[in-house]
Image: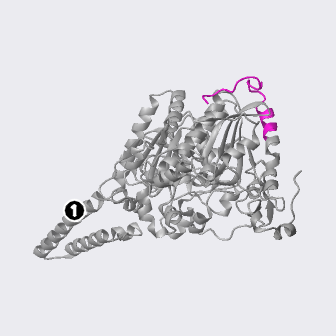
Amino acid sequence: MARWVSFEVLSKVDASAKGDFLQCQNCKKIIFSADFELGQRVCPYCNHHHRISARTRIEWTFDPGSFLEADLELSSVDTLGFPGYQAKLDQLREKGELADSVVTGTARLEGRPVSVGAADFSFIGGSMGSVNGEKITRALERAVDSRMPAILFCTSGGARMQEGILSLMQMAKTTAAVERCRANGVPYIAVFTDPTMAGVLASYASVADVILAEPKALVGFAGLRVSKQAGVGKVPDDFQTAEFVHAHGMVDKIVARKDLRRTLSGLVATLGGHLASTDSAEPIGGEA
Amino acid sequence: MAREYAKTHKEWEKPLTELEDNIAKLRELARRENDPIKRNDLNEKAARYQEQCDRFLNLMYRNLGDWEKVLIARAERRPYSLDYIQAISSGFIELDGDRLGFSDHAIIGGPALLEGRPVMIVGHQKGRNIQERQFRNFGMAKPEGYRKAIRLFEMAERFSMPVICLVDTPAADPGVESESRGISEAIAAAMLKMFELTVPSVAVVIGEGGSGGAIGIAVADRVLMQEYAVYSVIPPEGCAAILWRAPERAPEAAEALRVTAPSALEYGVIDGIIEEPPGAAHRDPISAAANLKEAILNALTELDGIGPETRKAARYEKFRQMGRFATLR
């Protein structure tokens, strides 16, 4: 187990040791970086689940080395000529870490093949544009075609404004793919992570067979700026949190990050038990 | 230099409506005039103004910017779902309730006869005065609205009735109540239900196609837009607030978002545009309704020629193809 360094000790630490330590975004306490990583970037003091990248998420959730990325070549285009969009895309592409706001492919979970997707908030707020919608749709279709459960980790500000009406249509497209999963008896599990909002929440995310959420994740339909404009008055303290939507019956279970792998594999083993390809020796299907 | 934009349709049309009011006054004066020569003069004057007015109207509507279309789509005088239902169908019976404890008035629906054929009509409904607007929640449906729609879609499926959706909403309701009852789930579930249908479905954006609130009841075999309707992923005000932290720059945002019917057609999001009479639907609701009816009937005739399973597969494929991206090597 990780040993947590006390605040008192840290306050005396030399400035040169910076980088070995970081501050919790929620409670502002200082955490030893190595411990922070060991704890899957969850604050040991306040249990705040810090945002993690799509790749890290996949690495931490699925069997080591089992992930095979698909559809890497799909790339967003500025169809509308929207102010600043092309520049933003170029800038993100230069960084080169991500092709778009979601990483998809196939992996194994305790030996069982699964079709997976994980959104990444660092790419235009994890927003769903044409590429994101296409990749989510393909991930769900891959699940149907290869008869394996689908697991999607959501984190998104919503539909990508910069692609206008085309982004809105991704809500329809991804939801249609969920309907295919249902019609074909393929389980689909969504995990709401911080934040899961608007167009993503109001489409494929909310119609999963099982919905899990990380503690305190922001989950809601209208962003605060939109709500304010619409003149929404006083809101409850826990408004738009995972706990709030759980209490209102929209989420099955709030699961701590460290327990996600176990919960997901349990669901895959039970809900996906009827699917043919559960033998770990078989190659994973799909075009990946 | 920044252009001056009107904030409401009323403001934008003011020069036109003032002219129209004055012509009406002249006509009234003429009607009351006993001297035939003077009466003739007044009538001629009115006719001249009318000609000018028509030319002015044509000019205004020929060079519409995207923002003007937003204003027209939001116009108070624009026909709403219930107006159209009354004009195009007979025997409409409004059904209500989500059977889960709630009733919504921003989405209305029920069975009706369209040229004698039973159809299930579901549409957003706005109000014209303060009381009505409050009652209709400004056309912003809560979860119960979408759950009622789902109920009606299921009923249509049971009784083999085509589904007609009339879309006209600024957005789904963003309030605490709606979040508590799962507005996101309700919208997604309504889309899911529409994808499950084997009966034909036609959706028409008749005013504002406001993001998630609109798409919830708009995933149909045929999706059409009236000429001056708008369809958008986010209200221009919201977009401007996020982009520039300046909601007053909504007109620019409307242009950037490409909210008009021709844009939606260009991007393959809709299947056709329904023409509106000169000066938009509110100037001649009867013609507007006639065009709407004809377009719906044509779409239904087309869809009747396709088998239920093929239709369902084609619907999937249609939405499946939506989106634009590049494939890098």
Q: Amino acid at mark 1?
A: Arg
Viewer-proximal residue among A4 and A228? A4
Query: Hey, which quadrant is residue B272 in on the image?
Result: top left
Q: Residues within 10 Å of mark 1 (few under 14, many from 20)?
A: few
Viewer-proximal residue among B178 and A29? A29
User: Is A182 left or right of B73, judged from the image as shown?
Assistant: right
Q: Which residues are magenta?
A: A264-288
Overall secondary structure of the magenta section: loop
User: Is B81 left or right of A250, judged from the image as shown?
Assistant: left
User: Is A187 left or right of B26, judged from the image as shown?
Assistant: right
Return the x and y of residue A137 as percentages of the image width and height.
Answer: 59, 38
> SS at mark 1?
helix
Relative to A255, say whether A29 is above or below.
Answer: below
User: Is B9 left or right of B99, judged from the image as shown?
Assistant: left
Residue A266 forms part of the magenta stretch: yes
Return the x and y of residue B195 as percentages of the image width and height.
Answer: 57, 38
Residue A131 forms part of the magenta stretch: no
- Identified at 59% across, 69% down, the residue is A231
Kindly give the residue lying farthest to the left in the view shown. B37
Query: Hey, which quadrant is residue B55 in on the image?
Result: bottom left
Examine the rendering and report whether any part of residue B212 can be seen: yes
Relative to A63, say whether A206 is above or below.
Answer: below
Residue beneath label 1, please?
B55
